[in-house]
Image (spheres, helix red, strand yellow):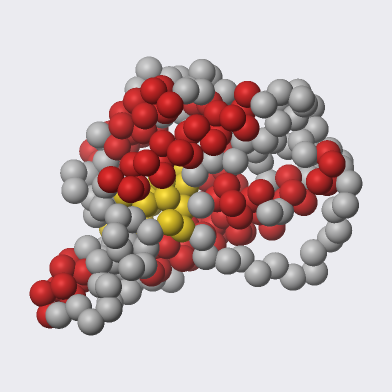
Amino acid sequence: MNRLPAPRRLAALTSFVVLCALTVPFAARAIGGDATVGTIDQGGAGATDQAVRINRLCTRVWMIGDSLTVGSAPAIRSGLGRMALEAELVDGVNNRRIAATAPISGVLAARSIRAANGEANCWVIALGTNDISNGVTTTTRARAAVAEMLREVTPDARVWWVNLDFGSLDDSTLYPDATRTFNAVLDERAASDPRFGVIDWYTLAEGHPEWFLKPDGTADAVHVNASGYAARAAQVVEVIRRNSER
């Protein structure tokens, strides 16, 4: 991720206390009209509905992300590895953006992963923060970026996108406003596409300003500490767990 010049959320951080225990709530928005995230079983479903639900269960999972995925990848891999998946892949690279023209591109990563590993019926995308810091700050640009990325995943695959939390390190509202814009585009997509869901990192992270403290006591606008990465990983793993079990 691009470095930012000053400390984050200072007012909230002045009341920081060390947490002795952490309970991570599951936080993902339902896709389409599904009763639970990623299923179409709405209670009382017949044999046909159940068969369709099972056919949509995750068996092969590919994840593409940026430095936040680098930080959470060990725990995500561990969690996915405990499931009865046919295959899983977690690919995080620092400074990764979406666009094919970016120096480190999510689009090109998806193409490479599919070429080397074949297809997956479930994808997790955790990109957008570096795009915000490189001009993707409007609804039009965010829609274009999301659409460009989704064109590169396996056709008809189910996709979850981890939404963004890009705080302010000074008095500027540019990045927080762009974060809300990007996240609104993701929610818009989830409302119209039954194969698309949002993993709500924003809400979870906003409730824990202490996660953004660095060892020297200063703060970060994007990156989190070990507790934050554990919570982020738990969100991703729980979504896949719920959608891989019969």
Q: Position of residue 119 (x, y in %)?
A: 22, 48
Residue 19, compared with residue 180, is above or below; it is: below
* Residue drawn at (32%, 74%) of the image: 245
- Residue at horizontal 59 percent and vertical 41 percent from the top: 165
The count of marks equals 0
Name the side, left or right, on which 87 lies relative to 67: left
Quarter containing the C terminus = bottom left
Q: Going by the picture, which residue comes out furthest to the left?
A: 48
Q: Position of residue 132 (x, y in %)?
A: 53, 26
The quadrant holding residue 1 is top right
The one of 167 and 83 positioned closer to us in this rendering: 167
Question: Residue placed at 86% from the left, 58% from the top?
Answer: 17
Can you see residue 201? yes
Q: Is residue 78 visible?
A: no
Q: Please provide percent x and percent y for residue 22.
A: 70, 67
Residue drawn at 21 percent across, 69 percent down: 53
Q: Is residue 196 above or below residue 116?
A: below
Left or right, 17 with respect to 195, comes to: right
> Left or right: 17 with respect to 199?
right
Percent position of residue 143, x then y: 36, 29
Q: Quadrant of residue 219?
A: top right
**Residue in front for this viewpoint, 151 or 9:** 9
